[in-house]
Amino acid sequence: MMSSRRSLFALAFAAIAASSIGFASAADLKEVRIGFQKAGIQPAVKERGVLEAALKEKGLSVKWVEFAFGPPLLEALNTGNIDFGYTGDTPPIFAQAAAANLLYVAALPGSGKNEGIVVPANSPIKSVADLKGKRLAIPKGSSAHNTAVAILEKAGLQFTDVTAVYLPPADGTAAFAGGTVDAWAIWDPYLALAEKSSARVLSFAGDAHDSIGFFLANREFTNAHGDLVALLNQTFAKEAQWANGHRDEITKSLAASTGVDPAVVSTLVGRSVFEVTPVTDKILAEQQQTADRFHKLGLIPKPINVRDIVWKWSPAS
């Protein structure tokens, strides 16, 4: 998570360094490095070995590199330490603003129910409007950051109407449980875990905006190996189709990889959609709105055009 301007500047310098990184030719390439999070279908895909099988035919192995959330994954993508990975909507915006060396290569539309703002069960806060003047925990630079701003705007509030307390998920969990914040903007499985502990969902992400995740790839890797990026997209897209019909297996895999109660995981899997699509004009319009929102708030230093870093992919390619 980018918790300070210093991390943004570090990413910018890393982008300069990354420009000198050379990627192996098709003949020399030995492995593809996938950045993943313990979320969605990713643990199940890793467990099923479908990427390994697809790439073995090309004489390549797969190296899975785990990340807790999106921004550090994108830093690794930018510097060429991984080739391909998944994040929510906001981390790529911060990365692009810092001149990161990456491209959007596919989109993962969400249900809008896997992220939101929660308050304690006994909180006097009954509506989003009641958040005015309250302390709201947010993982800075994450998709939940965008969700928080969108939910507040939908209720007629400015982001400055709340006191943002920037905390990574683990620290946010402690702050919310300890009562040092009044509300928390967060995603599953933390959201579902909070609900299990009797927290109330004040608003889901989908109440205020479209919830979209993305696959991104290192720009140099994509330019050198577009066929492999397309193959990764196609393989994940097929796995998403499989996942929609095998939710019990997704639940089992996620519970095993995260250590979260299977009953909680079942809740979040049940309200998820699994889909991998090209980055459409509609999705880009939503992402541009998010970028403009963060620039208006002064959280990114200059306007960006998200279309500048989109790689065109067709499922038939």
Image (cartoon, helix red, strand yellow):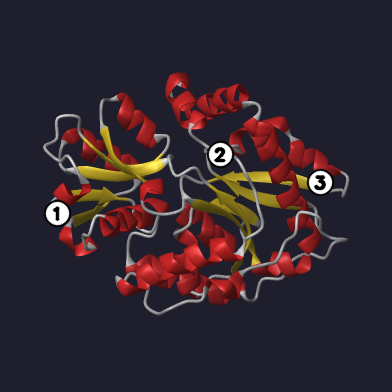
Label 2: element kind: loop
Relative to 241, residue 221 above or below: below
Please give the residue where the numbered disc 3 appears in the rendered image. 55
Label 3: element kind: helix
- Identity, as a three-letter code, of the amino acid under mark 3: Leu
Within 10 Å of disc 3 (Cα), the crowding (few <14, some 14-19, many 20+) is: some
**Is residue 259 among what the camera can see?**
no
Relative to 138, residue 170 above or below: above
Find residue 294 and report its horizontal and vertical position in percent: 36, 68
Label 1: element kind: loop
Q: Residue at x 88, y 61 (%)?
A: 27
The part of the image, by quadrant, that contains residue 77 is bottom right
Quadrant of the drawing holding the C terminus: bottom right
Within 10 Å of disc 1 (Cα), the crowding (few <14, some 14-19, many 20+) is: some
- Give whichever of discs 2 and 3 has the lower sequence position: 3
- Identity, as a three-letter code, of the amino acid under mark 2: Val
- Give whichever of discs 1 and 2 has the lower sequence position: 1
The part of the image, by quadrant, that contains residue 157 is bottom left
Within 10 Å of disc 2 (Cα), the crowding (few <14, some 14-19, many 20+) is: some
**Is residue 315 among what the camera can see?**
yes
Please give the residue where the numbered disc 2 appears in the rendered image. 273
How far apart in space, not on screen, are marks 1 and 3 (Cα)? 52 Å
Judge depth for marks 2 and 3 and give the one in front: 2
Instruction: Name the foreground residue: 36 vs 28.
Output: 36
Find residue 179 and report its horizontal and vertical position in percent: 15, 37
Judge depth for marks 1 and 3 and give the one in front: 1
- Identity, as a three-letter code, of the amino acid under mark 1: Lys
Please give the residue where the numbered disc 1 appears in the rendered image. 132
